[in-house]
Image (spheres, helix red, strand yellow):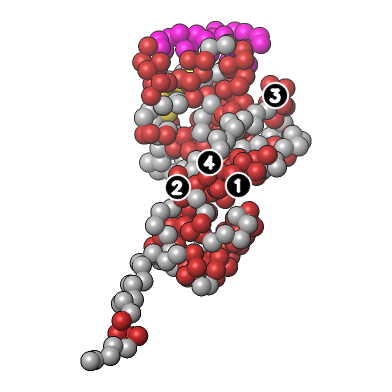
């Protein structure tokens, strides 16, 4: 009788599953994190600062998961971690950034065959509170615009026109520097903004103070514009001014005015919107002037009569009206 050996009687060994279990993750959380961070450096070529931020986020996850390996971390655990962070006072933006880092880490592990599913993709980040735009008070704005101008007549005329128009019509920096002289009507009462967000144009009113500054600038501009240059605002060489130069000039104006805060073109845009809305109470007209183009706002714009917008503007904007009517009848 043939005797079978124990090896012959034993059943064949089971194949190693494609997705490893926790016990088979030999290198542990730290090693997996190291490999992930190395990929960020070598393949995605992220900066050392960004990689360091990911490292901190992964260390927090390892600490909060109490020694569990990535395959053991499910959506419920991640939600509990997020809840603890929120209760501890972490800002929603910080929590959202950490969750985004964990999603990337788990995506990497899934591609490596360590996970079947990315639990972090089933977790929503906390809602960020609306970020309130910075705006100057009407008094601060008046002080800024009335600050002593540069000694150079060219800069004084151009800068005054730019800043008054930014505040008068709530323009973005890119919209202002993209304007051509043809975008102003004959009396500088209206401006056509052709290149706002979404590529759609809009017409905005121009207040009296801005009209006066623009008319003066146009006379100065005529003597410095390069041949065939259509741009409304020019640099010293007679060519279109860039957004960076606009920002630098406004920063210099804020410094001369002693505002004590960084004033950007968008701060003037927010200031205009805030002051206009506070004075008029007309939210629809404010949205129209700002050029916001979400679906709900667009539906409102379609029903908004432009003449009513102009009348509301003239009635409400702090610098739309003259304090003393001049004899030329400009109203």
What's the CA distance linking mark 2 and mark 4? 10 Å
**Residue bearing mark 4:** 125
| Residue tagged 3 | 137
| Mark 1 surroundings within 10 Å by alpha-carbon count, few (fewer than 14), some (14 through 19), many (20 or more) | some
Residue 256, numbered circle: none
Q: CA distance from mark 3 to mark 2?
A: 43 Å
Which quadrant holds the N terminus? bottom left
- The residue at the point 72 percent across, 26 percent down is 140
Mark toward the start of the polypeptide (3 vs 2): 2
Sooner in the amino-acid sequence: mark 4 or mark 3: 4
Cβ atoms at labels 3 and 2 below 8 Å apart:
no
Camera-near label (4 vs 3) is 4
Closer-to-camera residue (298/180): 298
Q: Which label's residue is closer to the chain start, 1 or 3?
A: 1
Which quarter of the figure has residue 202?
Answer: top left
Q: Position of residue 198 (x, y in %)?
A: 38, 34
Disc 2 is placed on an element classified as: helix
């Amino acid at each position: 009788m043939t005797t079978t050996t124990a090896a012959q009687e034993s059943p064949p060994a089971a194949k190693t599953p494609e997705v490893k279990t926790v016990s088979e993750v030999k290198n542990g959380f730290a090693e997996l994190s190291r490999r992930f961070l190395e990929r960020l450096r070598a393949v995605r070529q992220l900066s050392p600062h960004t990689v360091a931020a990911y490292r901190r986020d992964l260390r927090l996850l390892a600490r909060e998961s109490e020694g569990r390996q990535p395959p053991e971390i499910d959506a419920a655990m991640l939600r509990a971690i997020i809840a603890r962070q929120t209760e501890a006072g972490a800002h929603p933006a910080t929590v959202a950034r950490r969750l985004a880092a964990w999603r990337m880490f788990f995506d990497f592990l899934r591609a490596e065959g360590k996970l079947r599913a990315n639990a972090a993709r089933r977790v929503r980040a906390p809602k960020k509170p609306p970020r309130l735009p910075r705006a100057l008070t009407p008094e601060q704005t008046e002080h800024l615009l009335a600050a002593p101008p540069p000694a150079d007549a060219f800069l004084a005329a151009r800068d005054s026109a730019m800043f008054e128009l930014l505040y008068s019509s709530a323009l973005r920096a890119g919209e202002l520097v993209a304007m051509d002289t043809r975008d102003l009507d004959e009396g500088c009462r209206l401006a056509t903004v052709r290149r706002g967000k979404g590529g759609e144009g809009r017409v905005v009113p121009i207040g009296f103070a801005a009209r006066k500054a623009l008319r003066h600038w146009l006379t100065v501009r005529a003597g410095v514009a390069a041949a065939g240059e259509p741009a409304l605002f020019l640099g010293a060489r007679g060519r279109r001014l860039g957004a960076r130069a606009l920002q630098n000039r406004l920063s210099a104006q804020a410094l001369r005015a002693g505002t004590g805060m960084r004033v950007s073109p968008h701060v003037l845009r927010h200031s205009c919107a805030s002051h206009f809305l506070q004075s008029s109470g007309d939210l629809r007209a404010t949205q129209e002037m700002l050029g916001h183009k979400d679906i709900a706002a667009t539906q409102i714009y379609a029903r908004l009569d432009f003449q009513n917008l102009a009348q509301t503007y003239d009635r409400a904007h702090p610098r739309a009206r003259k304090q003393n009517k001049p004899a030329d009848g400009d109203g």
